[in-house]
Image: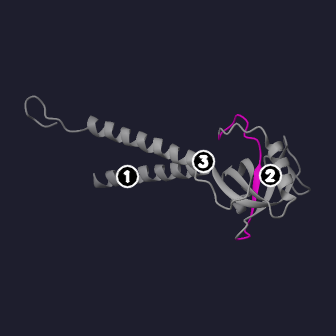
Amino acid sequence: MKWLRRSIWLVVLVALGIGALSLYYVLPRHDVVMITGVEVKRMDADGVVNAENPADGPTRDVYFINTEHPDTKKVVVYRNEDTAWSFPWYFKFDSADIQAKAQGYSRDANQLALIRYYGWRITILSMFPNVTEIQMTSSRDEPFPVFNAIFFGVFALLVLAVIIVIRRRFRKQPRVDQVVR
């Protein structure tokens, strides 16, 4: 019975880990950066369309925003693509407008931009975080993630409520004839 209990806890911990990573991927984050350039690439399901990878299906234009952190000079490339009606539900339809803003900010080498994005940069998989909003800023401080704090607060309350309901449901109660179930 001990192995069953440990197996259940292992499955629960793995599920919580996958859930936490999924939330970390889709919830918005912010970076204060300097925009160094912008570009557009033609892509299909296999990646960038070029001489080595010809288009073999429907293609789309994907905008990219090249940035540099003002203090560390670390370079980060962001994807700027509409999410439309698909998951994650950011309902983003203005990637061309965001690209135009980014291009304007790239003309001034000292202009800082606040970028809101979701996703990860995984170099080996050619994955880029997707920009959802871009604003001009003069502060190097990143804003407090209010949405994430509210989301996790409500989520913690829901989990606590479910735990309380389950514990009450399965609490051992004496039967009428004084025999414990």
Instruction: Give residue 170's quadrant in the image.
Output: top left
Contact (CB < 8 A) between labels 1 and 2? Answer: no
Q: Tell me the element at label 3.
A: loop
Which one is in front in this view, the residue at disc 2 or the one at disc 3? 3
Q: Residue furthest right?
A: 51
In this rendering, position of residue 59 left or right of residue 180 = right
As rendered, which of 38 and 42 lies closer to the eye?
Answer: 38
In this rendering, position of residue 160 left or right of residue 99 = left
Main SS of the magenta segment? loop
Q: Quickly name the residue at label 3.
A: 27
User: Taking 159 as reference, is 71 above or below it?
Assistant: below
Q: Quickly name the residue at label 1.
A: 9
Residue 83 in the image, given as x and y percentages of width and height: 72, 40
User: Taking 46 as reference, is 57 above or below it?
Assistant: above
Q: Which of marks 2 and 3 is nearer the N terminus?
A: 3
As rendered, which of 89 and 16 lies closer to the eye?
Answer: 89
Residue 94 in the image, given as x and y percentages of width and height: 79, 40
Indicate the amino acid at tag 1: Trp
- Where are the magenta residues, as a range? 72-88
Indicate the amino acid at tag 2: Gly
Indicate the amino acid at tag 3: Leu
Query: Is 147 within the magenta?
Result: no
Mark on residue 47?
2
Contact (CB < 8 A) between labels 1 and 3? Answer: no
Residue 75 in the image, given as x and y percentages of width and height: 75, 66
CA gap between label 1 and label 2 equals 39 Å
Which one is in front in this view, the residue at disc 1 or the one at disc 3? 3
The residue depicted at 10 percent of the width and 28 percent of the height is 176
Q: Tell me the element at label 1.
A: helix
